[in-house]
Amino acid sequence: MLMPVSIEPGSIDKNHFHLLLSLTSISSERIKLALEHYFVLGESQRSVCEVFDVNSSYFSLKVRVIQDVSRTVLALYPYYAELYRSASC
């Protein structure tokens, strides 16, 4: 079950964003840049869609992809924490 936690615009650093992005199939450079400006720099959806000339509805779908990947990683964390805790004993 996925947790109802979402990333707020401007709340993650560039490395965190690129790690999440690497777990997706998003390939459009314009969408990637728009998402980075949204999630890392905290720019509004309207602004990034205008600046990078991306469709707002399509952008929203890709925001959801990043949010879903983030929730999945968060849900997996306890399993990996336990695995590494057990391995270090």
Image (tube, grey):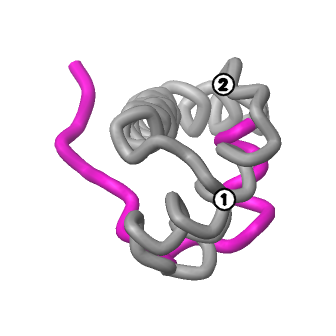
Instruction: Judge whether residue 74 can be spotted in this image.
Output: yes
Picture quadrant where residue 15 is located: bottom right
Circle 1 sits in a helix, a strand or a loop, which is it?
loop
Q: What's drawn in magenta, residue-wise? A: 1-21
Relative to 45, does residue 63 appear above or below in the rendering? above
Picture quadrant where residue 29 is located: top right
Q: Quadrant of the N terminus?
A: top left
The tag earlier along the polypeptide, 1 or 2, is: 2
Look at the image and say whether residue 16 sits in the magenta stretch.
yes
Q: Nearer the viewer, residue 17 or 33?
A: 33
Foreground tag (1 vs 2)? 1
Residue 52 tag number: 1
Q: Quadrant of the C terminus?
A: top right
Circle 2 sits in a helix, a strand or a loop, which is it?
loop
- Left/right of residue 71 with respect to residue 3 in the rendered view: right
Instruction: Judge whether residue 39 can be spotted in this image.
Output: no
Name the residue located 50 percent from the left edge and 26 percent from the top edge: 79
How many numbered circles does the render carry?
2
The residue pinned by badge 2 equals 24
- For the residue marked with disc 2, what is the amino acid? Thr
How packed is label 1: few (under 14 Cα within 10 Å), some, or many (20 or more)? some
- For the residue marked with disc 1, what is the amino acid? Phe
Name the residue located 78 percent from the left edge and 27 percent from the top edge: 27
Q: Nearer the viewer, residue 88 or 48?
A: 48
- Left/right of residue 31 with respect to residue 9 in the rendered view: right
Dominant secondary structure, magenta: loop
Relative to 9, does residue 76 appear above or below in the rendering? above
Relative to 38, does residue 6 appear above or below in the rendering? above
Q: Are marks 1 and 2 in contact (CB under 8 Å)?
A: no
Q: Position of residue 88 (x, y in %)?
A: 78, 38
Name the residue located 39 percent from the left edge and 46 percent from the top edge: 56
